[in-house]
Image (cartoon, coloured by chain):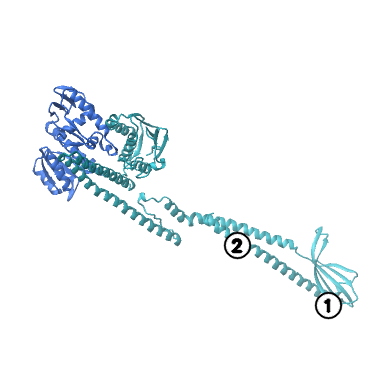
Chain colours: A blue, B cyan
Amino acid sequence: MKILIIEDEDTLAQSIRLYLEQDGCICEVAEKFADGITKSGLYDYDCVLVDITLPGGTGLDVIREMKRCQSKAGIIVISAKNSLDDKITGLEIGADDYLTKPFHLSELNARIKALVRRNQHQGDAVIVFGEITINPISRSVKVFDVEIFLTRSEYDLLVYLIANKNRIVSHESLAEHLIGEEADHLDDFKFVYSHIKNLRKKIVDAGGADHIKAIYGIGYKLSA
Amino acid sequence: MKLIQHTGRQFLLYSIAVLLAGSLGLYFTMKHLIREELDDSLHYVRTSIEKNPEIFHEEPFGQELLGDLIFLRPISHSSTKETFTDTSFYSTIEGEIEPFRKYTFHTTLGKKVYEVAICRKRIENKDILINIGGWTFGILFVLILILNMVNRRVAKYTWSPFYRALQSIKTFSLGTHKAHSQPLSGIDEFDDLNRELHQMTGKMLQDYVALKQFTENASHEIQTPLAVMQTKTELLYQSIDDQQQLQHVDDIRAAASKLAGINHSLLLLARIENRQFAEIKSVQVDVILKSKVDTLKPLTEGIQIEILHELHHTEVLANPYLLESLLSNLLMNAIRHNLSNGIVEIVLADRVLLIRNTGRPLTKTPELLFKRFSKDDESGTSTGLGLAIVQEICVQHGWRISYRNEGKWHEVRVAFGPFAI
């Protein structure tokens, strides 16, 4: 998977690159507006991450340019939390998703994967992880070909963990994935625990292996 | 007392004193003048009598001459003594006792010596007094009338720039970003006042805007480093195996996350106060609430909190983002401060939103609830800004918010007021 990161904050861009490359993605970073325009025009990417505030221009213009050139890449806007207008404009002019800073890398990763999957396979791709098969369209999950019935939260957690497999995913990012920015107000993330517990039980009951490992006090890690 | 009444009263008091003194002076002067004139003319009568003694040829003499009563009494010794006295006679014409001036002197008519008394009707002192007094009171009455009229006009027209300025100061608010300004009135004092007020409020606004701008800039600048910290800790998770070190990293993450929360809230507060959410439209509260409740289902199901709601269709004029923020904050508050297996009740009806939740008793006074950085639980990750934001949003939209505690039930009530476009 080829990803272009248009972000002027170098440390942030490198963190994103590192995280995504661990999954075998090929990442390029453009730190300036002109770079962003050039690179997004020259090469084909599966996904482009665009920061709105860039030296030399606005990320919105990068998106407009990409849309003008009929780029097929998925576009995710990453921007400061307070720019609500940017969010609306960004989505209006053709961005596929929007993420506000500060965000969790695991969330970004999951969004990229979901977006690319939708774009490349017109959505009919199934997610396979060991004995678990997920159909994102019907939101159905099978363990060894036996369908298990998950609640919305359990399903979302499973897809999220699979997208970030072999990595520690923090309680906070899971909580935010489930209820959005309201999780900011929370003192603890006990509710994540109860959903994960049920999810594990359902998979194990269906004969699957217990892939989800609790990292005490931190979060969870799903691995084969 | 109004200034104009005060000065009017002073003016009136002095006017009364001057008028009284003036009328007294006038009374005495007039009395004196009239008497002098009377005495002079009586003296003149004496001269005519002495020149024409032949008009008196009968004794005893008492006759009327040109309206004057003249009495003659023969005496043996003559002296130069003459007296003027006030006296009164019964007038047959008028049918009442009339005041007279009597001039008595000794003179020789023919060969005989007489005491002559000439009496002439005089004006009564009482009459003079009544006349002067009447005029004085008349003038006073007219004066009060005119003063009142002038005061009224002055208050209405001359003082109107002052009252306008006062009103403008009363309604002055930093949030509106408008300095005090009034058109020239043509009255130096008021123009001076307005000029100074304009400068003062302008300076205040400048300082205020600068401060807010600073808050906003600072907040914005803090965001990026926080994002870096958060992503770096996430990267660290992946490369650390040691549980204790992982815990340290997680503590850093939690701290950065809390900081990000505070920063976000402060920024939001600053932007609300800066009136940066000016866009107002009709928003359906019930729809937003319903979707919030749905969004939070993973949370409420996870910690087994029951949300009961009764949502009637309610439309309000609001900034959609702020309204959503208000509802989020209230809802999250009701969930966070709940008991295990607790209940949240939401009732939206008659343009009033009630959010009730079970919970532990408050440890601080309810008045402090809406204050910034005031929190019930010092150890929690709560920023203590949520209700301050709620309060600010309510103030901005002119909604009334109140809190009530009844046993284990905590209730927040938001009255949206009438819907008006």
| Residue drawn where x is 19% and y is 38% of the image | B243
Q: In terms of depth relative to the viewer, which is nearer, A98 or B403? A: B403
Q: In terms of depth relative to the viewer, which is nearer, A86 or B189? A: A86
Residue A185 appears at what percent x and percent y?
29, 38
Of all chains, the one bearing label 2 is: B
- In this rendering, is residue B136 above or below A116? below
Disc 1 from disc 2: Cα separation: 50 Å
- In this rendering, is residue B12 above or below B316? below
Is residue B123 in sight in this rendering? yes
Q: In terms of depth relative to the viewer, which is nearer, B56 or A160? A: A160
Of all chains, the one bearing label 1 is: B
Q: Residues within 10 Å of mark 2 (few under 14, many from 20)?
A: few
- Toward the top, the furthest residue is A146
Residue B247 appears at what percent x and percent y?
22, 40
Find disc 1 in the rendering and name its residue.
B80
Q: Amino acid at mark 1?
A: Thr
Please state, as top left, top right, bottom left or bottom right, where the N terminus of chain B lies in the image. Answer: bottom right
User: Is B24 positioned to the left or the right of A47 in the image?
Assistant: right
Find disc 2 in the rendering and name its residue.
B14
